[in-house]
Amino acid sequence: MTRDTDPLDQATSKRLSQLRTTPVDTSSLERKLAGVARAGDVKDQYRFTYRRVLRGATAMAAVIAIVVTVALTILTDPSTAVATPIELTRLHNDIVSGEVEMVVADSTEAANLQIASQMLNGPALPGFENHEVQSCCLANMRGDLRAVALLTVDGQPVTLVVAKGSDFAHAMGQPITIDDRTFTTHEMNGIQMVMKNKGDLWLCVMGHLPAEPLARVAAEIEM
Amino acid sequence: LRLTEGSDNPMDRFRRLAWPQLATLLRTARYLTRDESAAEDLVQETMIRAMKKMDTFKEGTDIRAWLMTILRRTHIDLYRANRKHENEISLDAANLLHIDLAANTLPGQFDDRWDDPDDLMQRFEDQTIVLALKTMPEDIRWTLLLVDVEQLDHAEAAEVLGVPVGTIKSRAHRGRAMLRDRLHAHATSIGLFRGTGSKPS
C-alpha cells in the first residue's frame, strides 16, 4: 500500500481539508487594511538615519538621549498614517536593545529643545512625574514626527511614542480605563501596547508588562 | 474594493488578485499563531509586504502560493526573535487539547475506531484538530496546512517551503501520522480509548 492509498492517510488528509471550510471573519482585518490600500503606494520604511551618540554624560538621574530617525512607519498619504503593531514592537526592541544610536541630552527640556531645533512644530515629549526617563528620540516620517522615550517601569523598559496627527491609525484591541481615562490595548510578541488618540496627538506606551501599569503611565501624561 | 481587470497598476493588481485571498491567509495564520490578534497582525504585515512586492508577481502563477511564501517569510521574521512565545503556543495548545477532548467526548467513545479511520477522524472537533496541529513541529505543520488544508499541489508547497517535492511528500505522510499519534495519545491519556483499538500507524 502506498502513502497515497493508505486509508489512514486519506482519512487524515480529508479531515484536515475540512478545516478549509471553517468560516473566517475578515472584517476587522479589512478595516485595518483599508487605510493601507487607500494609501496607494507603499514606501520603504524603517530606514533609520542615526546621529552618533555622544555617550557618557550620565551624571543626572534622568538622562535623556536624542536621536533623529527616519521612517518609523510604512504607509502614509495626506489623510492616512498606519503604525502597524509589528513596526511598533520592532521600534521598541531596537531601542531597548541599543541598536538605535542616540545623542545624549541631560534633561527633558534639553531633549525638547533638540527636537525643536531639528524640526519646526515637532511633537514635544511630555514630562514624567514618577518614572525615570532613560533616553528618547525623534522619529520622522515624511515630516510626520514621533517623539519616542524609553522609561523604566517596574524594572522593565517601556517605550513611549507620541505622534502628531489625529488620523494616525493603530490596531484595535480591548479598552482599559484608568482614572476615568480609556485607552486601547493591543498585544504582540509579548509586548503590550496601550494607545490613545486625542485631538492632534496619538500616544502609545508599550513594553513587556501587563496593560494596567502601562495604562497608568499613559494616564500620567497630559495630552 | 474596486476590481480592475487587466490593469498594470500594482495596486489594482493587488486588489484584484491578493485581496480575495485574505480569508485564506487569515485562516492559515490562525493555525500558526496563538490567538486571533496575533493572526491578524501577521496577515496585516503579510499584505503590506505583498503590496510592496506586487510588481514582482507573475500573473498566471498561483497567487495563493506566492502569498503563502510571503506569509511564511513574515512569520519567520516576526517570531525568530521571539522563540519564547512560540513555545508558549505549543504548551497552551497541549493543555487546551487535553481540556477540549475531555469536554467533547465520553469515555470509551473512541474504542476500535481506527478500524474505520474516516469515522474516527470525523469525531474530533475542528478545534481539537487545530490544537493538535499547533503542537507539531513547524515544518510539518506548514506542510499539512499547505497540502491538506489549502490543497496546494506538492510542487507549489515545495516552492513555498523551499524544499524538494519528495520532502513535501515525506513530511505530509509523517505529519498525518504524527497528528493521529497526538490525537490518539491525548484520547488515551484521558480514558477515551481502553487500549483495545488498533493503533494508528
Image (tube, rainbow, N blue to C red):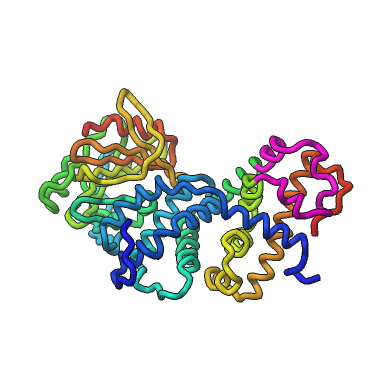
Looking at the image, can residue A96 be seen? Answer: no
Snapshot quadrant of residue B106: top right
Q: What kind of secondary structure does the magenta stretch mostly adopt?
A: helix
Region in magenta: B97-125
Quadrant (top left, top right, bottom left, bottom right) of the N terminus of chain B: bottom left
Q: How many marks?
A: 0
Which residue is pictured at 76% across the width and 50% down the height?
Answer: B120
What residue is at 26 percent from the left and 38 percent from the top? Answer: A197
Residue B69 in the image, given as x and y percentages of width and height: 48, 66
Place of residue B96 in the rendered image (x, y in percent of width and height, measured from the top left) = 64, 41
> Residue A140 falls in which quadrant of the image?
bottom left
Judge from the rendering whether residue A115 lies leftward or rightward of residue A3; answer left or right: left
Is residue B126 in view from this perspective?
A: yes
A205 or A15, which lies in front? A15
Q: Position of residue A15 (x, y in %)?
A: 67, 55
> At 26% from the left edge and 54% from the top edge, which residue is drawn?
A102
The reply to whether the magenta stretch includes residue B100 is yes
Q: Position of residue B21 (x, y in %)?
A: 45, 59
Q: Residue at x 45, y 64 (%)?
A: B67
Q: Is residue A220 magenta?
A: no
Instruction: Out of A135 and B92, give the one closest to the viewer.
Output: B92
Specify the farthest residue to the top: A179
Q: Nearer the viewer, residue B152 or B164?
A: B152
* Relative side of A114 to B115, left or right: left
